[in-house]
Structure formats: C-alpha cells, structure tokens
Image (tube, rainbow, N blue to C red):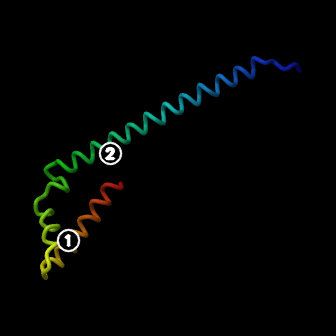
Amino acid sequence: MPYNSWHGVSASVSYFRAKQALETTILAQLNQVTESTFNLLVSWMKGPEGGCGKLEQAEYFSEALKDSNVSQAARKSASQLLAEYKRIVLL
C-alpha cells in the first residue's frame, strides 16, 4: 500500500485545530470561574449579610486584641469567624 503524504498533512491540521479548540475552551472556562469567584467575593463583602461588613463581627477582632477575660471569648469567636470565612472562600 503506497504512502499518501496528504494523510499526514491532514492528521497534522486536525491535531492543531483540535488543540487550539481545546485551549480556547479551557481559557474560556477559567475566565468564567475567575469572574464568578470575584463577583461572589465582592457581593459577599459588600452585601447586607456580608461577612466583612458586619459591625458586631468586627468588634470580635478589636476586643480580641485587648488583654482581659472578655478578650479570651472574643478571640474564640474571632477564630471561629475566620474559620467560616476560610471555608466560604475555599468552596
């Protein structure tokens, strides 16, 4: 059976087109995930229920820096709050 060089050219063209299509799809999905994550974090931080916007939660952190019996409880609450932030962000 004689070798047809067009088969090799055709296979190469198909390979490069498939590779380019796959790269384009992966980049589009990555951009979509990045944009969604960014939007989620922005809405989470700015929203009325937002984690960083709640005054009572911010008070945990300022109280935790003081040296008193109350600060021990505040440190525990602040630690739990940070763990929850980490869990949400790493979803």
Residue at image x 13%, y 75%?
66
Q: Secondary structure at mark 2?
A: helix
Which of the marked residues, 2 or 1, is nearer the chain's N terminus?
A: 2
Q: Secondary structure at mark 1?
A: helix
Give above or below for 9 relative to 83.
Answer: above
**Residue pointed to by mark 1:** 77
Closer to the camera, 66 or 46? 66
Residue at image x 75%, y 17%?
6
Residue at image x 20%, y 73%?
75
Hey, which quadrant is residue 19 in on the image? top right
**In the image, what residue type sits under mark 1?**
Ser
Q: Residues within 10 Å of mark 2 (few under 14, many from 20)?
A: some
Q: Residues within 10 Å of mark 1 (few under 14, many from 20)?
A: some
**Residue pointed to by mark 2:** 37
Hey, which quadrant is residue 88 in on the image? bottom left
The quadrant of the picture occupied by the C terminus is: bottom left
